[in-house]
Image: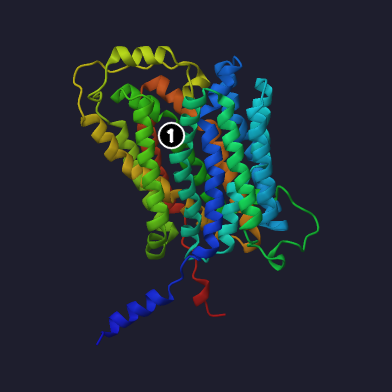
Amino acid sequence: MISHKQWQLSMTSQTRPRLDIERALPIFVLTFVDILGLTIILPLLHLYAVAFGATPMQIGLVAAAFPLAQLIGVPVMGALSDRYGRKPLLLISQITTCISFIMLASANSLEIIILSRVIDGLFGANIATAQAALTDITTDETRAQGLGLTGAAFGLGFIFGPLISIIALEVTDKLYVSALIAACYSFVSILLTAGLFKETLPLEKRGLADNRIKLFAGFRFLAQPQINVLLVLMFAQQVIFYGFESLLGLFVLSRLGLLGQGNGLIFFIVGVVLVTVQVRYIGKWTRKYGERKLVFLALGLLSIGLLLIAFTPAQPNPFYVRQIVENDLRDQRPSGAEAILGTINITLPENENRGLGGVAWMLVAIIPVAVGAGIIRPGLNSLMTRRVSPNDYGSVLGVSAAFVSAANAIAPLLGALLFELGGASLPFLVGGLLMGFLLMMSVWVIQPLPIIQSTNL
């Protein structure tokens, strides 16, 4: 015989809401294919610009064109998806993304490269629309897990996309080949959406009462205290985290003497942890603790991880030879965040004191950062959707994505400035302290939602 407590636990597990994998899986697959196309292109954008003789500021403009265009495009596309449904807007986004990759592959000037990124930014709301679709098919209890699937798609994309890009460049030595591969993946995502994706927003649930399309109505959430604090948190944490992503390569070079391969290994580990957390654990943690506490946990882990990274010992890896690294760097042009502000002076470690201590420290420190990154955005987005009506899911997620894009546009500038002013550790030290401040602020400003179901009317 089983005890009364065991029977209660059994009944709870049987009645507990679970994510509808059959409906969510096609959204995850098409999102992953979309991200794969994007991540094939991202590592090579600066090389496209350099090929046309771009200055560091022009390289920065190429990098910023997409997120700046998304500031306008994503909220508009999100509002349109609330009005016309997710599938048509997904198709429009994916078709324009495919066109932008073809433009990039055939570009014969720097202006065409920038224009291709602007077009993709204005109309390429693929991820925000996919998030809205997942929100449509989830409940309050399963929403963070559903939104975590898009994060898992990001993690997998950032594992395999750059790898495909590097292989294509090594085999063909032609930049346009990577752009064509990205266009092919984008075309596959169009076919998947057309054939597999079933509309998640029925006609009767769309905002059809108002005959006017309020394209920028999503920004009304800035005036709503329950939403605007979450948007500020989303923006602030993304500035800090994307600054970390932008500068990690410079940091491990100056502290550990690692070039691209070592940096790639670290990002591979980050990607594996991200996918594991978002596929296996975020649903369990959300059901047990709720999104509010999940956000607190994420901010705390990010703070601890960034502070640990800031204090990584300056010990080059066992295979480091300063002269070889100097020769490799001499043959390369600046890229990423340092290209935006010009060449940053990097102090390379000496050949003495080589060992595994610094690398081991970094591999430990990166774990809390990866876990925190895996749950922060799904947690915040899920909290936002619980504070709006179902008719506004696309709009609020579009505004959230716009805030992320704004953060991505300015984070490399701020991070590179701190790096230049205070050295390799300063951006991570400041980032860790700010994440700790955001944690304290979030405990104060994120109020728990009332349990409406138990209210006596």
Residue hosting label 1: 245
Instruction: Report x, y in % for residue 243.
Output: 45, 33
Which of 329 and 411 lies nearest the eye of the viewer? 329
Residue reaching furthest bottom? 1
Q: Residue at x 20, y 22 (%)?
A: 354
Other-residue count near label 1 (Cα within 10 Å), few / some / many at <14 / 14–19 / ≥20: some
Residue reaching furthest front? 171
Above or below, 363 relative to 372:
above
Q: Residue at x 63, y 43 (%)?
A: 187
Above or below, 13 relative to 419:
below
Q: Amino acid at mark 1?
A: Glu
Residue reaching furthest right? 211
Which of 219 and 32 lies nearest the eye of the viewer? 32
Tell me if 316 is positioned left or right of 198 in this view: left
Residue 439 visible in rendering: no
Instruction: Report x, y in % for residue 196.
Output: 61, 58
Res. 269 image quadrant: top left
Instruction: Report x, y in % for residue 141.
Output: 47, 66
Tell me if 348 is positioned left or right of 449 in this view: left
Tell me if 220 is positioned left or right of 31 in this view: right
Instruction: Report x, y in % for residue 307.
Output: 32, 36
Res. 247 image quadrant: top left
Q: Residue at x 22, y 24 (%)?
A: 318
Residue 192 visible in rendering: yes
Q: Secondary structure at mark 1?
A: helix
